[in-house]
Amino acid sequence: MHFIIKRFSAVICFVLISSAAMAQDRVVYHIDDAATQATKGLRNVRNHLDVAPKTRITVVTHANGVDFLMEDAKDAKNPSVDYGSLVSALKARGVTFEVCEITLINRSLKKEQFTLDAAFTPSGVARIAELQLRERAAYIKP
């Protein structure tokens, strides 16, 4: 009987360790000011995926952070940086980009003004909390 319990315990430990090893890292990048965070944040996300390609990354935007997800958006400091192509390339690698709908209301913006790569969430701040608490996503603010 002692042997069976010992063997069962070893199997349970193996399963738990294997599950932890197979767990996928989750990260939420928080952008609330596109002018100071977008280029740097997109570069951070790209570099992150280059070294940890299986990471599930969600970029949550609100306030002035939504601006880089608008159609034809470019970096004001460096107009050669086309946000649309950078976002599309990252989306192709599995990154999700979410825009706060409260921001849309507060700034009188419409969903049609945003790139097709953008998804929408009722509240950017609430979504960040949900990702951190329920999905155990690490929080990064570039």
Image (spheres, rainbow, N blue to C red):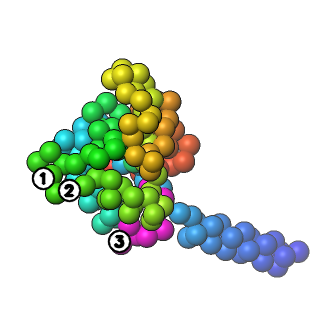
| Secondary element at tag 2 | loop
| Secondary element at tag 3 | helix
Instruction: Estimate the spatial distance between the alpha carbons at disc 3 and disc 2, rounded to whole Å.
Output: 20 Å
Kindly tell me whether residue 14 is visible in this rendering.
Answer: yes
Quadrant occupied by the N terminus? bottom right
Q: Compared to 46, does 33 lie above or below?
A: above
The spot of residue 119 in percent (x, y) is 48, 43
Q: Which residue is mark 1?
A: 78
Instruction: Estimate the spatial distance between the alpha carbons at disc 1 and disc 2, rounded to whole Å.
Output: 6 Å
Horizontal arrangement in the rendering, residue 53 relative to residue 10 (left or right): left
Query: Which of the 4 image quarters holds residue 49?
Result: bottom left
Viewer-closest of 50 and 132: 50
Q: Residue at x 33, y 38 (%)?
A: 66
Span shown in magenta? 49-58
Horizontal arrangement in the rendering, residue 102 relative to residue 134 (left or right): left
The spot of residue 76 in percent (x, y) is 15, 45
Residue 50: image tag: 3
Q: Confirm or deny contact between disc 3 and disc 1 (CB under 8 A).
A: no
Tag 2: residue type? Val
Q: Residue at x 39, y 40 (%)?
A: 114
Tag 3: residue type? Asp
- 110 drawn magenta: no
Q: Residue at x 44, y 50 (%)?
A: 117
The spot of residue 31 in percent (x, y) is 31, 42
Q: Residue at x 38, y 36 (%)?
A: 113
Q: Which residue is mark 2?
A: 81
- Lower position in the chain sequence, tag 3 or tag 2: 3
The spot of residue 20 in percent (x, y) is 58, 65
Q: Confirm or deny contact between disc 1 and disc 2 (CB under 8 A).
A: yes
